[in-house]
Amino acid sequence: MVESFLTILRVHPEIALFLTLGAGYVIGKIRVAGHDLGLVTGSLFAGLAIGQIGVEVAPEIKTIFLLMFLFANGYGAGPQFFQALRGDGIKPLILTAVICLSGLGMVWLMGTIMGLGPGYTAGLLSGSLTQSAAIGTATEAIMALPRPLAERQALVNQIPIADAVCYLFGFWGEVFYVAALMPRMIGLDLEKAAREMEGRMGLKQETGAHSAYVPHAVRGFRLRDGLPWPDAAGLEAAALARGSRVFVLRVRDANGRIEPADGATRLHAGDTIALAGQRGVLASFGAELGTEADDAELLDIPMERIDCLVSNSAAIGPTLGELAVSHGGVRGIFVPRIMRGGQEMPVNMSLRLDRGDVVTLMGQPDLVESAGRFLGFPMRATNVTDMFTLCIGIAVGCLIGLPALYIGTVKLSLSTAVGTLLAGLLAGWLRSWKPNVVGAIPEASVSFMISFGLAGFVAITGLHAGPAFIPALKEMGVALLIAGAVCTCVPPTIGLFLGHYVLRMNPVLLLGAISGAQTMTAAMVAVQERAKSRIPVLGFTVPYAVGNIILTTWGTVIVLLMTL
């Protein structure tokens, strides 16, 4: 019975592949020290286990998974990547370059000292630096070597073995090292520093921008006699002077007529107004206006919530507070969320928008539409992926990677993997500039392709490497574990002292930037948890976008370094 089932898996590798992905999902849910293993790591371990029976999946399928992941990864990172290259955030860019270069240098040094070949060294890089995408670029580089096919396949099978050994410390070791030990190394009280930074940014104060950019309510108030504000503008200004932002949206006059309100709308005793603002603010400030009125007709105001892609140059640079003052179209608009590079940003008066940010707007439809056009491109909810952008982008990327230069017997080329990554970067960047020209790939689709594409690739890699895993683990396990720990800890240490003592970066943002440079979202989350603040994410996004690209290409570079 068991042997029959194993025979089915060997004859029908597609069943083994999806079984591996399903098992990888379950394994990925295992939590250690508060963090999941993740789908990609779970799929690798499941592939190595199921691969013991000998399952062969067509290499073209593995390539398709990889290209889908690389294009989506580039598409999502494109706006932040080119933003950094234009010179914005030069210190995080320098920090990221140094951390990535030192990571490559340490892996090359350890691989050379230990006499590892290109396969084990590539796995040492992907595991210790926690960049599973480097498995793909390293695989392509090895398969392009002028060696017999059997030797190349053996080297490729070494990559996931070394990755599996080094990844565990690379993941949890780095999470603990960055979040728990690094603040002590520079004498930083992380929670206190985060509180102070929040105070400077106004995150814990009832400022105008803060109260306007959180979930809000609309409530009715019947105005009392003797109010000192003759119009809506005066009432709103009085609330703003107290650190709260409210808007008069409608007015029902003494004769029962309901009219929309703007700043010039006159207010009289006995009028009932529909007042929008933060719930806590309405409770306190509204009591000064008069008595609350539950006027269903007055409060029946159409409200819309849409996401807007920031692409207008005029909206990039000024702070949110400056935009709120300079652009009248933001009156009555609330911004409950801003996403940058897949991470939610803390919304406050001093935050500056970047090209490619996705800003959630909430308010009356005409006001939301006006503000959306000012910011860039309002994105109506859709689950439709522009297949032309996706498929032509991948095809063009593969073509970019085909040209090669030969130095002796060594073939130098971008490879279809790196070419597709570059095509994704370009498509994502063009989308942030010309959203009406370049088709949209919804965030959910990008997320699916990134997770499923990489998980499928490493699952197949694990299936192929399965038979060699246990013998290699016995032979190289301890040595690889030690080498991986060194390669995991040295680069962020160099980055810490460079950022703190040379670049003079804010230490809270520095820890977020170090996490981003090593593409470790879990480390950033751990820093946030210890800081009890979302502030570290402000330093995370640019290094994460740049580090993702650099570390992925290191898979190709390390193979070349170990074969020259």
Image: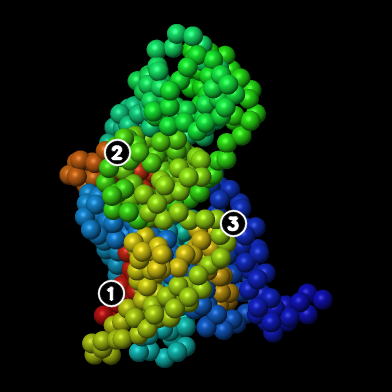
Amino acid type of disc 2?
A: Ser
Of the two numbered discs 1 and 3 in the rendering, the one whose residue sits closer to the viewer: 3
- Can residue 157 be seen in the rendering of this structure? no
- x then y, percent, for residue 541: 36, 50
Amino acid type of disc 3?
A: Gly
The crowding category of the residue bearing disc 3, from other C-alpha atoms within 10 Å (few below 14, some 14 to 19, many at least 20), is many
Amino acid type of disc 1?
A: Leu
Q: Quadrant of the N terminus?
A: bottom right
The crowding category of the residue bearing disc 2, from other C-alpha atoms within 10 Å (few below 14, some 14 to 19, many at least 20), is few
- x then y, percent, for residue 533: 42, 34
- x then y, percent, for residue 156: 45, 78
Closer to the camera, 416 or 260?
260
Q: Which residue is mark 2?
A: 326
- In the picture, residue 350 is in which quadrant? top left
Q: Is residue 258 left or right of 491 when viewed as pictured?
A: right
SS type, badge 2: helix
Mark sitting on residue 28: 3
